[in-house]
């Protein structure tokens, strides 16, 4: 986060502008390039800042068949996520390849395009004298803090990402990445796709893998009926079709 100490008089504005530019150069030269080296390389890890970051094509939690050893660990994790609600999990961050690419593109745009532009504006505004009523300066500092918070969030989520390659799977069982056609008495027929927490868009039928509806569907099969428990009440869902389409 960019924090620049306020100067008591206008004679220090030049020094202030230099502080802004120096900090930005430090970020651009050292900190942010490390984040931009994060990449999904078909399951290959990469060292980032001395730490090896693994991008696994598919977690065993999502390929495990019913009754196989280790299923209890997956169930325990699901229970923990249910207690945590629908916020992004601080641990595993399952994500589709398209979702990973979108987050990487957003990070690059913030670091390489928007942030340098805002820093230039702040530096220019600081050189204009009194900053107490300088709208460009005040807004620019506020926007820099917002950008830096978002950059830190994206870096953390990308570092923890486990990219799941699910498109084209040949199974009628519901795992991460599945597109599921449903029918219920209350809502009729609808289709949902189970994606990562950072990709969820309910208006497009894309639900987080630890949302209540996804938890109800995971590991069920085509033709099964499952019970969705929610604050609005219980709802029985009939699974009409399970497929694994590419997620754009």
Image: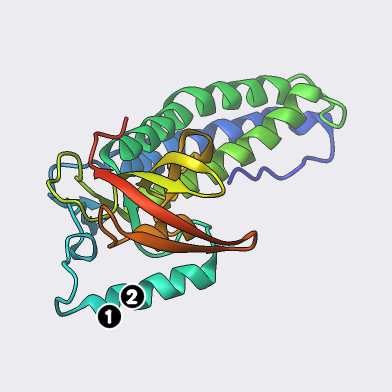
Crowding around mark 2 (Cα neighbors within 10 Å: few <14, some 14 to 19, many 20+) is few
Tell me whether circle 2 and circle 1 mark residues in contact (CB < 8 Å): yes
Which residue corresponds to mark 2?
A: 75
Residue 72, image quadrant: bottom left
Which of 224 and 100 lies nearest the eye of the viewer? 224
Q: Quadrant of the C terminus?
A: top left
Which residue corresponds to mark 1?
A: 72
Task: Name the residue rendered at 17%, 60% in the picture.
Answer: 63
- Alpha carbon distance from label 2 to label 1: 5 Å
Q: Is residue 111 above or below residue 154?
A: above
Which of 112 and 198 lies nearest the eye of the viewer? 198
**Residue 222 coordinates in the image, percent (x, y):** 26, 52
Residue 15 in sight here: no
Q: Is residue 235 left or right of residue 63?
A: right
**Residue 137 coordinates in the image, percent (x, y):** 74, 27
Secondary structure beneath dot 2 equals helix
Q: Is residue 61 left or right of residue 43?
A: right
Crowding around mark 1 (Cα neighbors within 10 Å: few <14, some 14 to 19, many 20+) is few
Q: Is residue 213 left or right of residue 33?
A: right
**Residue 46 coordinates in the image, percent (x, y):** 18, 50
Secondary structure beneath dot 1 equals helix
**Residue 85 coordinates in the image, percent (x, y):** 54, 64
């Amino acid at each position: 986060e960019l924090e620049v100490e306020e100067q008591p008089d206008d004679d220090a504005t030049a020094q202030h502008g230099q502080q802004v530019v120096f900090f930005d150069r430090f970020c651009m030269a050292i900190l942010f390039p490390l984040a931009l080296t994060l990449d999904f390389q078909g399951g290959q890890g990469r060292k980032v800042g001395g730490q090896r970051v693994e991008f696994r094509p598919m977690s065993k939690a999502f390929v495990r068949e019913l009754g196989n050893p280790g299923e209890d660990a997956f169930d325990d994790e699901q229970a923990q996520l249910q207690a945590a609600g629908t916020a992004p999990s601080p641990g595993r961050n399952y994500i589709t390849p398209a979702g990973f690419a979108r987050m990487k593109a957003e990070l690059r745009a913030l670091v390489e395009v928007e942030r340098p532009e805002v820093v230039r504006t702040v530096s220019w505004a600081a050189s204009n004298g009194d900053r107490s009523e300088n709208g460009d300066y005040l807004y620019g500092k506020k926007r820099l803090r917002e950008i830096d918070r978002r950059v830190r969030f994206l870096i953390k989520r990308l570092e923890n990402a486990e990219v799941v390659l699910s498109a084209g799977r040949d199974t009628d069982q519901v795992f991460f990445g599945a597109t599921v056609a449903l029918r219920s008495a209350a809502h009729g027929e609808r289709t949902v796709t189970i994606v990562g927490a950072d990709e969820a868009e309910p208006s497009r039928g894309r639900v987080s893998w630890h949302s209540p509806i996804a938890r109800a569907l995971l590991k069920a099969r085509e033709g099964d009926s499952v019970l969705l428990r929610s604050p609005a009440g219980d709802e029985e869902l009939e699974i009409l079709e399970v497929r694994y389409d590419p997620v754009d």
